[in-house]
């Protein structure tokens, strides 16, 4: 199959990621063992509730928000595909997406879970693929241990240790969270890393040290701060947060963003909390590191925090992949409440059910735990969390004096704006009765005003689901069912050919011989090239295994989509028809251009040119 290898090389030239580079030189037998030991249904079911529908399993997509299940798993082909967002692939791809892992990381994680021996691969991949990142990870791990040692074993660390103990931090918690201390010196970590032959330029790029403002050389980035290591979701130290020990600003200083650390894609304590989050299907979102750690010691072990930055859509997607419900537990002051309000839409748009823990005014969760204890915190704060609607009403009520007539009227109007959009009549009635008692206005009067407001909102909003949300239910804003995109005949033919080729090597050989790389759509040509090369290596038809050979996100989604389509049974006649349809398209395109060119010549009065074009058109029609 020399032609197949040529097409494979052509696929690489089209900037499709090649197999070996994407996989990190992972031996095929390890990848195959991982796929054999990790059934797609079992893998997905840890994160998504699946229901059997014929030969498929369906559930709500963990990668985007939807009310109607469009996430589909095909057990016999060992693939998943979402008709809403287009995510698709095999069990390894699912783990990559849901856990935010690279291909080698996903394979390694899944292999270790199944006790599959990795042989010598792990060391070779690590050294060969990302030496700079590996050195940086090693430097962060050593630096974290150094800070921890300085806290617990030196005179420099005594004031920091006394402060932590005064805040209720036990030795067990200090050890578990690897809390440390950066001394008030300029070169402790610089010298520590230099003695271990780390390149200072790399360490500066990685955020561990800083260049001197004046002169040559480097200085420690963190000085006289209590150090909290920040881990990625796999438990690797990738950054630090330093809390100043004395007076000064900023109170907290985070590592800069690097190749390892991205604030908008990192949640503090996720590596510790993710098992508990999965088990409970619930996460508690705190504002700071201290709150997370105190809550952990109090028994709340599903807590995480954003990295000193606003919550992002990616944070919400990460949580949606692990749980169904998020409890926001921010400080009890107005700033904390305002931040909670701001994050409601972000979390709800990700498909999460959101509740709010009400912390006493002027206190943060850490204060509450130290004053009243962990048991009361769980019972009174976490377990008594209220709905977002209830929280909004409480928040609004604080802005008005209900003893005054004007305050009651203003509050009731603002409350109706919160209650009216609710779709459940029962929910609306419960909240309306509460407001009625608070403002001393007849319930039926409030209900009538609420119904008028709902009618007004419905006229503005149109039909269907909440148009603000990224739901996938196939409706346009005018309420009409969205019509599916009709593909051109050649497009359908190409998809059918690839569908059959992925299930049968002889069909692929036949298409290679009669069509080769003459697919009109570039992605289809690339997939065909990979298929020719795949079969040239003597491999058997296996969609999941083939997907692992691609290592290109776009192509993986396309293959998953193609394998989910309903295609007629293949036969020589149908196969030839599809090949003919694919070959005909470029000729048809040329024909249309020639006809337009002929009409232009006739309009300009160039009869000779028009006659020449007619001859060309006849030749194309014969073809």
Image (tube, helix red, strand yellow):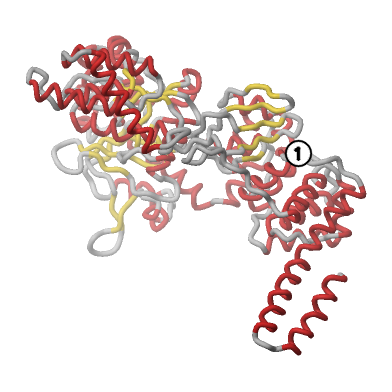
Furthest-left residue in this view: 404
Q: In this view, does 294 lie above or below 196?
A: above
Question: At 83% from the left edge and 53% from the top edge, which residue is drawn?
Answer: 578
| Image quadrant where residue 355 sits | top left
In the picture, residue 407 is in which quadrant? top left
Give the SS element for disc 1.
loop
At x 84%, y 70%, the residue is: 621
Task: Measuring from the top left, give residue 567's x and y in whole percent.
Answer: 79, 41
- Residue annotated with mark 1: 566
Q: Does residue 316 sit above or below 558 in this rendering?
A: above
Q: In this view, does 597 lie to the left or right of 131?
A: right
Q: Quadrant of the C terminus?
A: bottom right
Q: In the figure, is residue 39 to the left or right of 232?
A: right
Question: In which quadrant of the rendered view does residue 596 lie?
Answer: bottom right
Whether residue 150 can be seen here: no
Q: Can residue 354 be seen in this view?
A: yes
Residue 592 on image: x %, y %: 72, 70
Residue furthest right as drawn: 572
In the foreground, 178 or 264: 264
Q: Position of residue 560 (x, y in %)?
A: 68, 42
Quarter of the N terminus within the rendering: bottom right
Tell which of 585 and 394 is nearer to you.
Answer: 585
Picture coordinates of residue 232, whole percent (x, y) = 45, 37
Q: Left or right: 246 with respect to 467?
A: left
Whether residue 177 is situated above or below residue 619 in the rendered picture? above
């Amino acid at each position: 199959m020399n032609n197949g290898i040529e097409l494979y090389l052509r696929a690489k030239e089209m900037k499709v990621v090649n197999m070996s580079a994407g996989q990190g030189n992972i031996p095929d037998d390890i990848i195959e063992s991982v796929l054999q030991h990790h059934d797609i249904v079992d893998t997905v079911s840890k994160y998504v509730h699946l229901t059997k529908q014929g030969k498929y399993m369906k559930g709500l997509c963990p990668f985007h928000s939807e009310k109607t299940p469009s996430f589909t798993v095909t057990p016999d082909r060992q693939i998943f595909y979402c008709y809403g967002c287009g995510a698709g692939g095999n069990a390894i791809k699912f783990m990559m997406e849901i856990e935010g892992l690279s291909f080698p990381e996903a394979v390694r994680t899944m292999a270790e879970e199944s006790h599959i021996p990795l042989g010598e691969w792990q060391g070779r991949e690590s050294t060969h693929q990302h030496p700079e990142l590996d050195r940086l990870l090693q430097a962060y791990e050593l630096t974290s241990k150094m800070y921890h040692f300085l806290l617990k074993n030196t005179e420099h660390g005594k004031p920091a240790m006394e402060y932590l103990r005064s805040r209720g931090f036990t030795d067990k918690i200090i050890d578990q969270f690897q809390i440390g201390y950066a001394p008030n010196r300029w070169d402790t970590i610089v010298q520590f890393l230099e003695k271990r032959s780390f390149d200072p330029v790399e360490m500066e790029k990685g955020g561990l040290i800083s260049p001197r403002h004046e002169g040559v050389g480097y200085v420690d980035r963190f000085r006289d701060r209590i150090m909290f290591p920040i881990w990625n979701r796999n438990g690797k130290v990738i950054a630090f947060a330093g809390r100043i020990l004395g007076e000064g600003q900023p109170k907290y200083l985070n590592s800069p963003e690097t190749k390892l650390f991205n604030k908008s894609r990192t949640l503090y304590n996720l590596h510790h909390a993710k098992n508990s989050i999965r088990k409970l299907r619930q996460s508690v979102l705190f504002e700071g590191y201290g709150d997370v750690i105190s809550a952990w010691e109090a028994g709340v072990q599903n807590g995480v925090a954003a990295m000193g930055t606003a919550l992002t859509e990616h944070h919400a997607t990460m949580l949606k992949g692990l749980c169904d419900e998020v409890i926001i537990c921010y400080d009890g002051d107005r700033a904390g409440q305002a931040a909670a309000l701001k994050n409601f839409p972000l979390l709800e748009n990700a498909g999460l059910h959101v509740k709010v823990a009400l912390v006493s005014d002027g206190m943060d969760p850490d204060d509450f735990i130290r004053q009243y204890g962990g048991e009361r915190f769980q019972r009174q704060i976490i377990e008594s969390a209220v709905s977002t609607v209830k929280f909004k009403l409480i928040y609004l009520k604080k802005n008005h004096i209900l003893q005054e007539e004007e305050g009651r009227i203003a509050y009731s109007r603002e409350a109706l704006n919160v209650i009216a959009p609710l779709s459940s009549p029962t929910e609306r009635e419960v909240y309306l009765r509460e407001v009625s008692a608070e403002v001393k206005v007849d319930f039926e009067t409030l209900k009538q005003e609420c119904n008028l407001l709902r009618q007004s909102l419905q006229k503005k909003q149109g039909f269907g689901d909440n148009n603000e949300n990224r739901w996938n239910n196939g409706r346009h804003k005018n309420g009409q069912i969205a019509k599916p995109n009709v593909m051109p005949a050649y497009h359908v033919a190409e998809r059918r050919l690839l569908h059959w080729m992925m299930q049968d090597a002889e069909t692929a050989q036949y298409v290679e011989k009669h069509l080769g790389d003459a697919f009109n759509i570039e992605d289809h040509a690339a997939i065909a090239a990979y298929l020719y090369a795949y079969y040239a290596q003597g491999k058997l038809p296996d969609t999941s295994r083939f997907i692992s050979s691609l290592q290109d996100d776009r192509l993986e989604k396309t293959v998953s989509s193609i394998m989910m389509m309903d295609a007629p049974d293949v036969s020589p006649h149908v196969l030839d028809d599809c090949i003919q349809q694919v070959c005909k398209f470029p000729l048809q395109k040329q024909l249309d251009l020639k006809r337009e060119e002929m009409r232009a010549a006739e309009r300009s009065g160039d009869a000779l040119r028009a006659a020449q074009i007619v001859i060309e058109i006849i030749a194309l029609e014969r073809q």
